[in-house]
Amino acid sequence: MFKDKKLVESVNSGKKIGKIDVALFDTSNFYLFLEELAQKSWP
């Protein structure tokens, strides 16, 4: 999945970018959460 690949890249390259990295991670989780909700709402 596109988002997951981006997330992994940011984590791997990311130790320098601490806070940005965490923000990216949280944002990705938020969107994954929204997608799950959408799938439950529209079977």
Image (cartoon, rainbow, N blue to C red):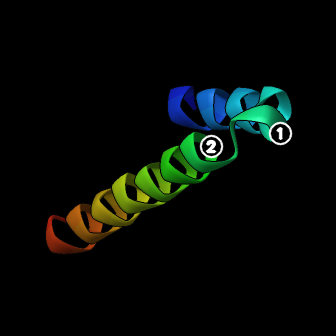
State which quadrant residue 10 falls in.
Answer: top right
Quadrant of the snapshot with the N terminus: top right
Q: Residues within 10 Å of mark 2 (few under 14, many from 20)?
A: some
Up the image or down, 37 lies above or below 35; here it is below
Q: Which mark is residue 21?
A: 2
List x then y, in percent, for residue 30. 38, 61
Of pointers 1 and 2, the one earlier in the residue sequence: 1
29 vs 2: above or below: below
**What residue is pinned by disc 1?**
15
Q: Quadrant of the C terminus?
A: bottom left
- Mark 1 and mark 2: span between their CA atoms? 8 Å
Q: Amino acid at mark 2?
A: Asp
Residue 18 vertical position relative to residue 1 in the rendered view, above or below: below
Q: Amino acid at mark 1?
A: Lys
Q: Residue at x 81, y 26 (%)?
A: 13
Describe residue 5's horizontal placement relative to residue 2 as left or right: right
User: In what element is the residue under mark 2?
Assistant: helix
Instruction: Please provide percent x and percent y for residue 29.
Output: 48, 59
Tell me the number on the disc at residue 34: none
Quadrant in which residue 33 is drawn: bottom left
> Residue 4: horizontal and vertical position, in percent?
61, 38
> Secondary structure under badge 1?
helix
Hey, which quadrant is residue 20 in on the image? top right
Disc 1 residue crowd, few under 14, some 14–19, many 20+, Cα 10 Å: few
Mark 1–mark 2 CB contact (< 8 Å): yes
Residue at image x 15%, y 64%? Answer: 42
